Image: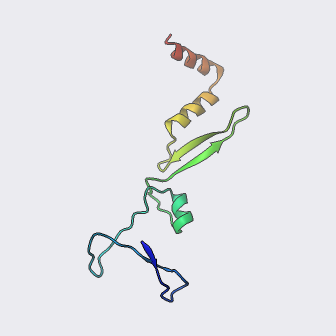
Amino acid sequence: ARIDKDKGFSGAGDILHLTTGKSFSKGDEAFISYGALTNLDTLADYGFVTPQNPFNSESVQVRMMRRDPFPITVFADGSVDAGSKATLRYYLANEAELEQFSTLEDGT
């Protein structure tokens, strides 16, 4: 891609030319891939979001009393990554659940 000289639209450097290895006829539909970007990335960089974006995920810093902050990744479908889920379960477990967890670790 290259920025062409100003053509008198809205300002200097406002023309973008894309080159492709395929020929297009007038009226053909062409698609541009922005890559594996989250909605936050496309909103900030290009001004739009996609409702069904499979790459949409957000990372949230969770702060809990007497714990170091840790990140949780929330995916487009609302699910949470397995590592974050395990950390949350461990931090929120009561004494009986922690005892059960420790016996699973020991294999008893």
What is the x, y in percent for residue 68? 68, 35
Q: Is residue 83 above or below residue 30?
A: above
Q: Residue at x 57, y 64 (%)?
A: 44
Residue furthest to the bottom in view is 8
Which residue occupies 42% across, 71% down?
1
- Direction from residue 88 to residue 20 in the image, left or right: left
Q: Position of residue 30 (x, y in %)?
A: 33, 72
Question: In the displayed image of the protein, which residue is found farthest to the top?
Answer: 108
In this rendered view, identify the residue nearer to me: 11 or 96. 11
Q: Is residue 32 above or below residue 37?
A: below
Q: Residue at x 60, y 41 (%)?
A: 71
Q: Quadrant of residue 73?
A: top right
Say which of 35 and 99 sits in front.
35
- In the figure, is residue 93 to the left or right of 22? right
Quarter of the image holding residue 95?
top right
Residue shown at the point (32%, 70%) measured from the top left: 20
Q: Name above or below for residue 71 compared with residue 37.
A: above
Rendered position, 4 above or below 81: below
